[in-house]
Amino acid sequence: MKFADLGDLVVLTLRTPDRAVRLLRGLDLAASERWMLVILAASLSSLLAGIARLIFPVPEGDPLARILSDPMTLAGLQFGAMAVSAIAVTVIGRAFGGKGVFADALVLVGWVELILVGLQAVQLFLMLLVPPLANLMSLLAFGLSIYLTISLTKALHGFTSTPKVALGFIGGVFLVATVLSVIAAAFGVLPEVAP
């Protein structure tokens, strides 16, 4: 696959996710290449976030802001979040009769993140030139991430019902968020709530 083909793959992913999944599976990437895709997506996203923080500094004193201000930590967190997402997509999908495997889920999660990195770059550009449009781009990116996750999960597992996949996605988000918040609280990332 050439670099010029990426634009066509983005359009195919948005229009017919099931064909995009077949094409991505057809690449028959090695395990190391699949992990490299995830590392690339996490690195590019962290790089753009770091540039945004340099241009628009965040307030100091917040433990979460302190953690996110370190590019390596942010890249590690994003890498971990993508790996957990791929595991969740695989395990939850297979629990409901899906046929997808972790290796393919990893590629799809990495691919979705790369698409969102493109939107992140556009958003950074708009933050400099037309800040109100940057907020609109944030909403677009959020909606697109949900659409792509549901559509590609449906295609990955061979499901036929979009509403059922959407319901599974919502339940999966709550489950993963609960687990991650417990882990974050255990490491003192989340502030304690006063009684």
Image: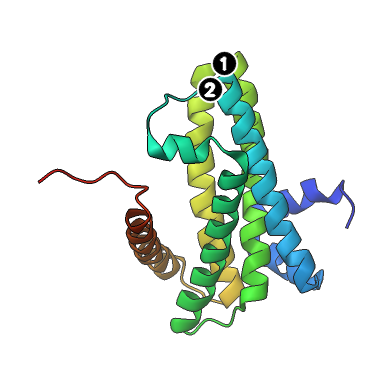
Q: Is residue 94 visible?
A: yes
Depth check, front residue: 71 or 83: 71
Question: Disc number at residue 122?
Answer: none
| Residue 62 higher or lower than 35, as above or below | above
Q: Residue furthest top?
A: 129
Helix, strand or loop at mark 2:
helix
Tell me residue 195's x, y (percent): 9, 46
Q: Quadrant of the N terminus?
A: bottom right
Q: Amino acid at mark 1?
A: Val
Mark 2 sits on what residue? 133
Residue drawn 46% across and 71% down? 161
Depth check, front residue: 74 or 96: 74
Depth check, front residue: 152 or 161: 152
According to the image, what is the colour scheme of the structure? rainbow
Q: Amino acid at mark 2?
A: Leu
Q: Is residue 23 visible?
A: no
Helix, strand or loop at mark 1:
loop
Q: Is residue 181 left or right of residue 5?
A: left
Tell me residue 117's x, y (percent): 65, 42
Quadrant of residue 152 within the rendered picture: bottom right
| Residue 107 higher or lower than 113, as above or below | below
Residue drawn 52% across and 65% down? 84
Tell me residue 73's x, y (percent): 57, 46
Q: Is residue 94 left or right of residue 32?
A: left
| Residue 70 higher or lower than 154, as above or below | above
Mark 1 sits on what residue? 130
Residue drawn 71% across and 65% down? 19
How many C-alpha atoms fall within 10 Å of the one at disc 1: few (<14), some, or many (≥20)? few
Residue contact between numbered discs 2 and 1, judged by CB atoms under 8 Å: yes
Quadrant of residue 20 within the rendered picture: bottom right
